[in-house]
Amino acid sequence: MTTGAGETGTGEPPEVRILEERAVDELVGKIQNAASAPGAASAVERWMAEHPTELWTARGHDHVVIGDVLMYLHDAPDGTVIPHECHPDGRERVYTDLDHAEMAFEV
């Protein structure tokens, strides 16, 4: 299931992908592990210098580049961690469970 809210660097609404809570938790763990790997921070700096800054990127943490995609985590007001995926062309995708889909873009 997908829905849109807010805007990305393309002016298009971000795509929200609804996953099972377990799948979101697994994705969060993978992003955190990859972000702590040697060289991850420098790869993120290069990616950010070469591509448009996305709406939520500065509010995020645990940034990591996977292939040509920037992934990071964003904290919703209730403390839920929401994974984001930013593409070089400015498209952004957010992964969350159904219970948190409405707050995916709240700060």
Image (cartoon, grey):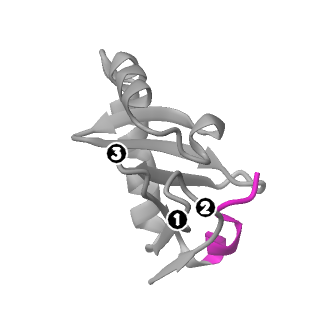
* Label placed on residue 7: 2
> Is 102 one of the magenta-colored residues?
yes
Identify the residue at image location x=52%, y=51%. Answer: 9
- Spatial CA distance of label 3 from label 2 is 15 Å
Q: Spot the residue most to the bottom.
A: 1
Tag 1: residue type? Pro
* The N terminus sits in image quarter: bottom left
Q: Going 70% across and 54% down the picture, which residue do you hit?
A: 76
Q: Are marks 3 and 2 in contact (CB under 8 Å)?
A: no
Q: Is residue 69 left or right of residue 76?
A: left
Q: Is residue 17 above or below residue 89?
A: below
Q: Marks 2 and 1, how far apart in space?
A: 6 Å
State the residue in front, 74 or 70. 70
Residues 50 and 33: in front is 50
- Relative depth, front residue between 91 and 15: 91
For the residues bearing labels 2 and 1, Cβ distance under 8 angstroms = yes
Residue at image point 42% right, 52% down = 85
Label located before the other in sequence (3 or 2):
2
Magenta span has 7? no
Q: Which residues are magenta?
A: 99-107
Describe residue 88's horizontal placement relative to residue 56 as left or right: left
Q: Circle 2: is it few (<14), some (14-19), or many (20+) Cα within 10 Å?
A: some
How many numbered marks, from 0 up? 3
* Labels 2 and 1: the sequence-earlier one: 2
- Under circle 3, the secondary element is loop
Residue that badge 3 annotates: 88
User: On residue 2, which mark appears?
Assistant: none
Instruction: Give the image quarter of residue 106.
Output: bottom right
Q: Which residue is mark 1?
A: 14
Q: Amino acid at mark 3?
A: Pro
Residue 29 horizontal/vertical position (percent) = 41, 44
